[in-house]
Image (spheres, rainbow, N blue to C red):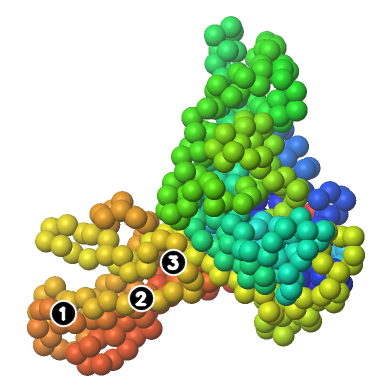
Amino acid sequence: MWLGIDLGTTYSAMATVDESGRPQMVPNRDGEILTPSAIYLAPDGSAVVGQAALDMALEQPERVATLVKRFMGRPEYDRPVAGRTFRPETLSAILLKKLAQDAQAALGPIEGCVITVPAYYDDTRRQATLNAGRIAGLPVLDILDEPTAAALAYACQSGWFHPRPLDASDSGNSSDRPRIVMIYDLGGGTFDVTLVKLARQRFQVLAIEGDVRLGGRDWDERLANWAAEQFLQHFHADPRDDPQSCAQLLANAERVKRTLSKIEQTTFTLNYAGQRLTLPVTRADLEQLTQDLLLRTRLTVQQLLQQAHLDWEQVDQVLLVGGSTHMPAVTRMLRELSGRDPNRSLAVSEVVARGAALHAGILGARRQLFPAAPSLRPGSGESAAGFRWDEIVEIHVNAHSLGVEVRNGPDRIHHKLIGKNTQLPASAEHVYYTVRENQSRVRVRILQGEAHQADACIPVGECWIEDLPPGLPQGSPIRVRCTVQANGCIHVSAADLTSGRSVTATLYRPSGLTDEQIAREADWLSQLRIL
């Protein structure tokens, strides 16, 4: 079985490819397609994952971890869980292992899996996600950007993987010209927008923008804070002061937000300190409270088009992804911008997992782990003729510029080697020079970001070129080469041009895990009973 995992901030999902080559969702043990990304560590030493854990957050919030994805890349989760400090990778691994257990129970052993990440994730967060898969003991083939996964699923449904032109009855396309699709992905904790060019058996990412600290949770918090302030004014008590009450407040806010996506008005009820307050709230109230959040996504969309040197007339479809796109304000805003209705032809909460499963099939075929897909069945919205997984071309780009920190007098600046939205894999090199005589080693600090000043960029990690020849004069040349793989992960090599000695530099990531630490966390997890 090849498994695609949408590792979400608030909900996660799984998919596989069936015998006909189509992606199919894999339900969890409870029969649900979506699994809440919540982990409850019970007093008996076991872990409960999913809806039951989310329910326990209302009773024992100190034992429940949620929104773990927002802390990936950091040394620690934001607070102790059940009295213990955890790495975000370890908590994510518990969730991944639970998903894998449920998939194996339904379909058998997992031969390879693909885990999705926000497109705007930097290298540190990507490595943390890979490490979570290693801790969980999963055979991870790759990590894949979430909007890219969604576009893969859309391309498969629309027939773009077919080797020959389709007529209008196959996919609704009246011509075989390449199409440009924008994927607007507003999830529970992150926001991405991506432009993809689709052609026959060719899938090319053009440009990426995003915000890893913007998602539906921010709408929940805005509504929860508004309600808490109303309660405070009425009763001079703040329901945010108590962890259990705060968890209930946020749960109510999410329910109200979901309700207002379907009807114009509802009520928000708060119970705290023996007092009860019921507030009427309208969809217009929520939109007013959160208009700046939606504006952030609008500006990001416009920035993406500018970077890609495209206008709306060149965009054929706007594809909605992520549960937060159910909010009517999102559809209205995108309609105003693009002049067309966004595409909702795929379930917004399932499409990422489906695309991840397709990517696993493509990789499996290239590695001879997966056979060519047999003919697809008529009437499924896909071509009745077969296609070969290994003939599908995928082209990706990097979300952040990559460079090296260098000294310029008293300043430390970011010297870019690989620009943002460069096709991957990509490599670039540059010759730098030692700063003093008899220098025995050189530190190479790798950065991601668009700023000129090094301090304003994201530090990926650093490596040292050791044992330089003795007696080197100031200004001796050192050549540094950086490579970004197709999945956005980074490798560095360097050469001392005086001696001609090459060094494959191992990046030390300050917030990352060593192999020994990964093994230790994996051993702990292997003994944890997960329900």
* Cα distance in 3D space between marks 2 and 1: 25 Å
Report the amino acid beneath label 2: Ala
Residue at coordinates 66% horizontally, 46% vertically from top-left?
Answer: 320
Of pointers 2 and 1, the one earlier in the residue sequence: 2
Crowding at label 3, few (<14), some or many (≥20) Cα neighbours within 10 Å? Answer: some
Report the amino acid beneath label 3: Thr
Q: Nearer the viewer, mark 3 or mark 2?
A: 3
Residue indicated by mark 1: 439
Q: Are marks 3 and 1 in contact (CB under 8 Å)?
A: no
98 or 139: nearer the viewer: 139
User: Could you say which disc has been placed on residue 454 in the image?
Assistant: none
314 or 271: nearer the viewer: 314
Residue 466, given in percent of the width and then of the height, sits at 27, 82
Q: Are marks 2 and 1 in contact (CB under 8 Å)?
A: no
Residue 498, by quadrant, is bottom left
Q: Are marks 3 and 2 in contact (CB under 8 Å)?
A: no
Secondary structure of residue under mark 3: loop
Residue 275 visible to the viewer: yes
Report the amino acid beneath label 1: Gln
